[in-house]
Image (spheres, rainbow, N blue to C red):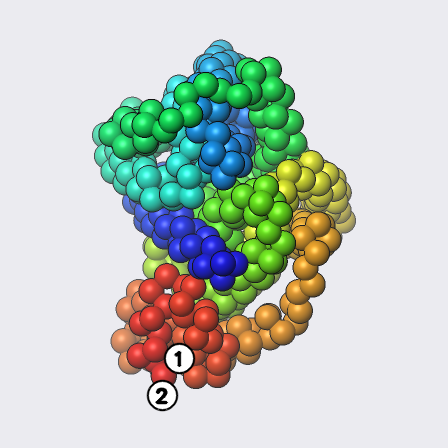
Amino acid sequence: MADSSTKNLIRQGSFLVASQFIVRLINLLYRIPVTNLWGDKGLGIYSDAYQVYGFFLVFASISIPTVISKMVGERIATGRYADVKKVLSLATLLVGGIGFVSMLIMLLGGHFIAITFFSNPEATRPMQYLGPTVLICSLMSVLRGYFQGLNDMKPTAVSEVIEGLLHAIFAVVLAFLLNPFGMEWSVTGGIIGTGIGAIGAILFLAFVYARCSARKLQKNPESVPEESSSTIYRQMLSLMVPIVISSTIFSIKGIIDAWIFGEMMIRTGTEAGQMIAMRGIYSGKFIVLLNLPVAIGESLGAAAVPSIAVSKALNDQKALRSHFNSMIKTVLLITVPCAIGMAIMGKPVLRLMFPAAPQGGELFWIGSMAVVFYSLSYIAGGVLNGLGKAHISMIHAGIGVVVTSLWNVFGILVLHWGIYTLAVNAILFSALIMILNLRSAMKFCGVKINYLKLFFGPLICSLIMGVGCIFCYLLFFAITGSNAVTSIISVLFGIVLYFVLAVNLKVIGKKDMENLPGGKYLNYLKL
């Protein structure tokens, strides 16, 4: 039973992994033309506006799917279907109100925020145009949480891809159309694409709910809710508040980092335009690329919440341990080679993607292992959320922000590391959160994990893959003289080499192939 439910967890999580990977790849690809259009300064304006958007999205949207999925999953497991409908109604009222207030703050206070926290008045208009999108995303998050609570990740996954595609298409088109009116309007055009993507996604989710899910709930014989509105709201808020605070800390961290970096760099004599460009390199290139593989841990962590909640509600300790172990191994199998690959191929890949603004590749030499650390921290955080221990993640995030804020000041003013301070920041924060979250999750699950054993195999295969990528790049660059051709060949060669090594050295076993999406095809790599 535990193996079956774990396999289903990995399978359902794989839908979110695939959609998140596709969305982040689309996000990365659409930034190529707009970055070449705007340059690093325009990317800095865009990133500053998005920092504030992300902050308000935490209150109105990001924590909601986790909370709703846990509440729906628990009630479905115990047959309280009428209470599921009541949870959805009350959540829509609460979250819609929060989204509306957040929208007003961004619309009316955008200029103040842009000047006070970013010293960047050009971020005002993009910030204001993101306000309505917060309201749309807040309502959409309720539907996503509902489907995740049913342990059906496909509607959420498809909606994310729709949102990403519409966002990318309209962002690029509008950025170029509005470019003759100046940088600020061009960036605003890119921002408007975000709202169009959100509208497309919520329409799809509403359609799926109306056609299928609502009818299923209506057919259930249970028609009278057992819980009062006050009881549901109390549970909702008890779950939401620590997750919101934890997520807010993550979001505030980006704003704090941007503010400290700007203030400290200006104190060292750096011009404001150059400082904004550096922030654009870090947020718009390094972090965007880093987030591609981090989607694996983030998505599995989100998928884990209802499964962990159900296992806890049924007191199934065996399933709980099985879920935890399988997710950790799956994440390490994929993120470790991604981290090594980024450290080696990050610089040539940036030259391939942003020929007009290729700076920033050196950040991957320092910060690529954050891929592994962030992914594991998301897994452990998802387990803690599923167990109803979200307040623990909140405390850990707060500790991380304090430590990394002190590091930013020290790294810039004392060590004079400039933009590299931010790369170390990413490593320091992700490693600290990972260690603290994993320790707590293992304690409450009663699980002991041999991390050295799980980490050693993927690391050896990844290091061999890395050496292979270096030789492949040098060979094909000597033959073709083209960084673009050589980078693509080297990345593809590295992927194939890693999986050939992992399969034949038994790092990926038969059970792993059954759990991994498309894992059966790895049998063809056996020598």
Element at label 2: loop
Whole-percent x and y of residue 197?
31, 32
Marks 1 & 2, CB-CB < 8 Å contact: yes
Examine the rendered structure and indicate whether residue 208 appears above or below residue 285. above
Instruction: Evaluate whether residue 127 shows in this view.
Output: no
Q: Which of 415 and 340 is in front in this view?
A: 340
Task: Using residue 18 as the reference point, say whether residue 391 is left or right of it.
Answer: right
Q: Which amino acid does label 2 sit on?
A: Leu
Whole-percent x and y of residue 404?
70, 45
Q: Which mark is residue 527?
A: 2
Whole-Å distance between the Cαs marked 1 and 2?
A: 8 Å
**Picture quarter containing residue 348?**
bottom left
User: Residue sitting at 33 percent across and 24 percent down?
Assistant: 218
Examine the rendered structure and indicate whether residue 391 appears above or below residue 434. above
Whole-percent x and y of residue 79?
47, 34
Identify residue for label 1: 500
User: Residue sitting at 41 percent across and 70 percent down?
Assistant: 513
Q: Which of 399 and 502 is in front in this view?
A: 502
Examine the rendered structure and indicate whether residue 112 appears above or below residue 504. above
Q: Which amino acid does label 1 sit on?
A: Val
Examine the rendered structure and indicate whether residue 236 appears above or below residue 435. above
